[in-house]
Image (cartoon, grey):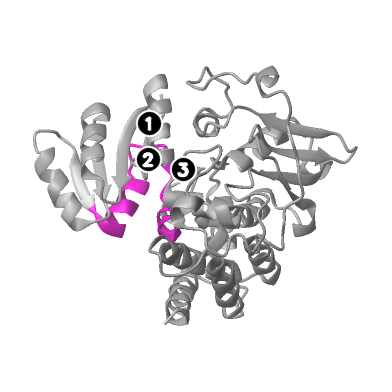
Amino acid sequence: MKNISVLGSTGSIGTQTLDVCRMHGYGVKCLTANSNVDLMERQVREFKPELVCMMSETAANDLKMKISDTDTRVVFGMHGLIECAVYSGADTVLNSVVGMIGLQPTLEAIKAKKTIALANKETLVAGGHLVTNLAKEYGVSILPVDSEHSAIFQAMQGSPSKDAVKKIILTASGGPFFGKTLEELENVTAADALQHPNWDMGQKITIDSATMMNKGLEFIEAKWLFDMPNEDIEIVVHRESVIHSAIVYQDNSMIAQLGVPDMRIPIQYALTYPLRCASPVAPLSLADYGKLTFFEPDYNTFKCIDVCKNAIELGGLHPAAANGANEESVKLFLEGKIKFTDIAYLNEEAMRNAPEKQNFTLADVLETDTAAREYVKQAIL
């Protein structure tokens, strides 16, 4: 019996994680959310966690009143989020919060020797060696939940050694604007950008998919997860989102992981690893798809990919700056304050302004993140 803390339980990944927990009867010890009190109340009543956290103190107080007839304890804020991440009753922490807020609870969960099922890509993008070195020090496994990194992880299970792997191939859907030119994207709206063709995700991640910043962040994440040189990570646009990613062996054979575009597959594999179990996901019919297509990314139109590639090439705090700037620029775009095409420009400028420091600390990352967000806000005044 696994006992799990789900960080970000009311979001897309969180609710699908609870689908998996429901099917397999896993114990849900902790749940966290930002401010969705109504959904959290329903989750508390179904899964009966021992501890829940709302990031908003107002939401936490509201929840306390609504579930006062239960035994669940309610906490709030970053302190509460960390308390859920290190909770002694859970052995696995599934981190699906969105953004930089996920870094600190991941680090603390590693110190508490929890198995990490990681859906929060910002943890590795911004934290880099802080996270991977700490995981090695404490002997903690980081199991990827992103569909692409899970696919690579799954494909690597058949590898005799890491040296046998020649290249990683990250597939990308191309988002809602595949085939568009930079000029055609000049005046697209948030409503346009939120129309993802294959995946049902939260707003921030859906915008990242539209700009392809998401794939750039995944490029950085893949480097840290699999310790591969930048030049050995390739991005390919695959519109159908059936091949979730692949690896190429030294003999040039390719091993790919396929499945319908449903996040419950990688979520479940992170929770059941190394076992394979029945899942709530529909089977894949290749005949129904008929054909699968592949394209080179349009780097001229989707400049955010190179923002991330440049950031990890520069190293140090540059990825943290790119990520922080992106979180702020996406927020401004959703609020209608900047154009879609401004996102890449602002991210690049903020990334280039990051301090040159390779051996950084958590305090450095947090300071860089704040500075990058402030840079973006000041740039539009």
Residue type highlighted by circle 1:
Leu
Image quadrant where residue 70 sits: top left
How far across and how far down the image is residue 142, in percent?
55, 44
Residues at marks 1 and 2 touching, judged by CB atoms closer than 8 Å: yes
Q: Name the residue located 57 percent from the left edge and 47 percent from the top edge.
A: 176
| Residue type (three-letter) at the residue carrying disc 3 | Met
Left or right of residue 210: residue 234: right
List the residue tagged with mark 3. 201
**Distance Cα–Cα, label 2 vs label 3:** 17 Å
Provide the residue designation for mark 1: 18
Q: Residue furthest right?
A: 251
What amino acid does circle 2 point to?
Val
Q: In this rendering, which labeled residue sits more in front, label 2 or label 3?
A: 3
Q: Where does residue 272 sit, x and y in percent of width and height?
A: 52, 27
Q: Nearer the viewer, mark 1 or mark 3?
A: 3
Give the labeled residue for mark 2: 6
Which sits in the foreground, 137 or 154? 154
User: Do tag 2 and tag 3 residues touch (Cβ < 8 Å)?
Assistant: no
Going from N to C along the chain, the mark reached first, 1 or 3, is 1
In this rendering, does residue 86 appear at all?
no
Within 10 angstroms of label 2, few (less than 14), some, or many (20 or more) residues? many
Magenta span = 76-105
Along the polypeptide, which appears first: circle 2 or circle 3?
A: 2
